């Protein structure tokens, strides 16, 4: 399917207030796996011609020594790999629950970048929470920002390249996109603010490396700022002396009034930087789930990031497939899943995922995602591309001469005839 179209960390970080929960333990296990994932491709290849594993009931799989039972229970396919696995594939999972949380008066944030998940070179993610009135201060990035609202509602603002304003309210399920260098802000709305996911088109991106209004002014001579604003230095005495990043303020007024004032003489921007997913039909809806695609063909401003929003019912499968045009960065919104990634050299690895986990699959590597829970599985597929593209095993085989397929897989005609003739995306149809 194809649709074309440095700075140091602040000194005023709040203390880590979260208790060490089960999710924290699970994250710790994933972090240890991530450290192992930093092996070079040469090291991985050297490991990978192993003797096939025996059945899981074999006594050789027992582990009588010290172990962390909570981590093992949450990662069964790492603790006791499938017989079809052949290790040495880089770790492709990291939970946000283990990421450092920056606590502020007004909200918090945490990030998963290539530093936390070494395989994730093309995209990075930030999970952020704002209270009602809490502000992610006026700023811009050296990377493009794509966002998905997970909870609540927020007001977003920016100006376009012509200096015209954009002010809008977004709610759960909505998206926004701010290109590189476009200044913007986010503020939580009543009654309980917002939580959202930010995805950046650079695996090395860090939220610590952002141009912030307060930080910029704090590092500009006050007499220069006064001259620029046409005011006295005395009028600037209360300006912050370091970055705000996230801070608490009063909830904003009516949207229409903010839009009117921000528009000024230039008028509002003709560009819509927000996207309402409820206003677009899914690319495919089946009894086993649905796939909703958002790329530059439907969300015009999103020229650097494409996405699929996927829901898989219990027992369902996001079919065996691969992406020819870009690496895939995943975020698991709800439910439980397992995923096997097949790599070159006869290597394969299966890992387990649940709410809040980040996954990553390198470009062209085959994989599937299976719902292993008893509730709906919902996750994002993110790509550093202007368009979404995937190829499925079923469509490959359906459009290949059947005799050729039979010769490879040793299937009889009756079996060949039952294979999917179209690309289902989610199975069973």
Image (spheres, rainbow, N blue to C red):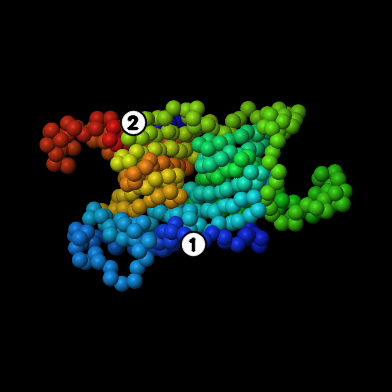
Residue 277 picture location, percent across and down: 49, 32
Secondary structure type for disc 2: strand
Question: Distance of mark 2 from mark 1, alpha carbons?
Answer: 40 Å
Q: Are marks 2 and 1 in contact (CB under 8 Å)?
A: no
Q: Residue, x 34% and y 46% (percent of image)?
A: 373
In the image, taking residue 129 as reference, residue 315 lies left or right, namely left
Tell me if residue 55 comes above or below residue 189 in the rendering: below
Q: Residue, x 52% and y 61% (percent of image)?
A: 19
Hey, which quadrant is residue 188 in on the image? top right
Q: Earlier in the sequence, mark 2 or mark 1?
A: 1
Residue 280 picture location, percent across and down: 47, 28
Secondary structure type for disc 1: loop
Residue 271 picture location, percent across and down: 61, 30
Name the residue that disc number 1 marks.
20
Q: Is residue 186 visible?
A: no
Name the residue that disc number 2 marks.
286
Hey, which quadrant is residue 284 in on the image? top left
The quadrant of the rendering that contains the N terminus is: top left
Q: Residue, x 54% and y 44% (percent of image)?
A: 196
Q: Is residue 222 visible?
A: yes
Q: Residues within 10 Å of mark 1 (few under 14, many from 20)?
A: few
**Residue positioned most to the front:** 191
């Amino acid at each position: 399917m194809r649709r074309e179209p440095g700075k140091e960390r602040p000194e005023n970080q709040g203390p880590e207030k979260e208790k060490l929960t089960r999710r924290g333990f699970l994250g710790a296990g994933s972090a240890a796996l991530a450290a192992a994932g930093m092996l070079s491709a040469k090291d991985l290849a050297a490991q990978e011609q192993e003797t096939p594993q025996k059945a899981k009931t074999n006594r050789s799989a027992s582990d009588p020594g010290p172990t962390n039972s909570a981590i093992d229970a949450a990662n069964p396919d790492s603790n006791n790999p499938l017989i079809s696995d052949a290790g040495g594939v880089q770790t492709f999972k990291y939970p946000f629950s283990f990421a450092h949380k920056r606590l502020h008066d007004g909200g918090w944030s945490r990030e998963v970048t290539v530093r936390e998940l070494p395989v994730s070179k093309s995209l990075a993610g930030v999970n952020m929470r704002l209270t009602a009135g809490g502000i992610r201060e006026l700023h811009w990035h050296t990377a493009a920002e794509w966002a998905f609202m997970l909870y609540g509602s927020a007001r977003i603002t920016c100006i376009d390249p012509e200096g015209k304003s954009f002010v809008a309210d977004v709610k759960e399920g909505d998206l926004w996109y701010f290109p590189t260098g476009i200044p913007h802000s986010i503020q939580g709305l009543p009654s309980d603010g917002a939580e959202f996911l930010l995805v950046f088109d650079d695996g090395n991106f860090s939220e610590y490396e952002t141009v912030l209004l307060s930080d910029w002014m704090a590092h500009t001579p006050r007499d220069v700022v006064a001259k620029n604003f046409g005011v006295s230095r005395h009028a600037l005495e209360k300006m912050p002396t370091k970055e705000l990043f996230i801070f608490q303020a009063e909830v904003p007024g009516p949207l229409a009034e903010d839009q009117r004032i921000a528009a000024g003489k230039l008028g509002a921007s003709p560009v819509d930087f927000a996207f309402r997913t409820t206003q677009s039909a899914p690319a495919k809806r089946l009894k086993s789930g649905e796939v909703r695609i958002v790329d530059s063909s439907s969300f015009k401003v999103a020229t650097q990031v494409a996405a699929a929003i996927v829901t898989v019912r219990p027992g369902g499968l996001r079919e065996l497939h691969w992406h020819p045009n870009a690496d895939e960065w995943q975020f698991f919104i709800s439910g439980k899943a397992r995923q096997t990634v097949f790599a070159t050299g006869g290597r394969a690895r299966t890992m387990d995922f649940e709410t809040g986990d980040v996954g990553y699959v390198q470009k062209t590597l085959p994989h599937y995602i299976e719902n292993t829970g008893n509730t709906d599985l919902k996750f994002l597929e993110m790509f550093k591309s202007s368009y979404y593209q995937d190829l499925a095993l079923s469509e490959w085989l359906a459009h290949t001469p059947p005799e050729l397929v039979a010769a490879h897989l040793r299937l009889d005609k009756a079996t060949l005839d039952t294979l999917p003739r179209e690309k289902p995306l989610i199975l069973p149809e």
